[in-house]
Amino acid sequence: MAALYKYALIVLLLVVMFNLGQALYFMMTDRGRTNRTVWALTRRIGFSLLLILLVIIGIVTGLLQPHDLAG
């Protein structure tokens, strides 16, 4: 179950990065004539919030184990 959860987080991270790249592409090609850049960035923010929420839920439920980098 934990491995599936981690794969879902990785896929969601890739979706966030795809939306960011999509927004960059729309910004360069549309030059402000359409709202596609705004919608791509809005989706990215929504998916980023979902990703953060899923990481928090994973830590609370024990599916994800944070590591101590100092020790």
Image (spheres, rainbow, N blue to C red):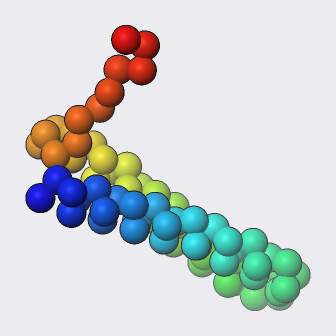
Q: Where residue 44 sits in the image (x, y, percent)?
A: 53, 66
Q: Where residue 35 sits in the image (x, y, percent)?
A: 70, 83
Q: In which quarter of the image is residue 23?
A: bottom right
- Which quadrant does the C terminus fall into? top left
Residue at 34% of width from left, 59% of height from top?
Answer: 9
User: On screen, 20 above or below 1?
Assistant: below
Q: Quadrant of residue 33?
A: bottom right
Q: Can residue 46 be seen in this view?
A: no
User: On screen, 16 above or below 38?
Assistant: above
User: On screen, 8 above or below 67?
Assistant: below
Residue at 46% of width from left, 61% of height from top?
Answer: 13
Residue at 80% of width from left, 76% of height from top?
Answer: 27
Residue at 51% of width from left, 61% of height from top?
Answer: 45
| 7 vs 29, nearest the viewer | 7
Q: Where residue 67 sits in the image (x, y, percent)?
A: 32, 27
Position of residue 45 in the picture relative to residue 11 (left or right): right
Q: Can residue 20 be seen in this view?
A: yes
| 3 vs 27, nearest the viewer | 3
Which residue lies most toward the top here?
71
Position of residue 9 in the picture relative to residue 39 (left or right): left
- Which quadrant does the N terminus fall into? bottom left
Q: Where residue 54 sits in the image (x, y, percent)?
A: 28, 53
Q: Quadrant of residue 7?
A: bottom left
| 46 vs 6, nearest the viewer | 6
Position of residue 40 in the picture relative to residue 26 (left or right): left
Position of residue 11 in the picture relative to residue 25 (left or right): left
Q: How many labels does the image show?
A: 0
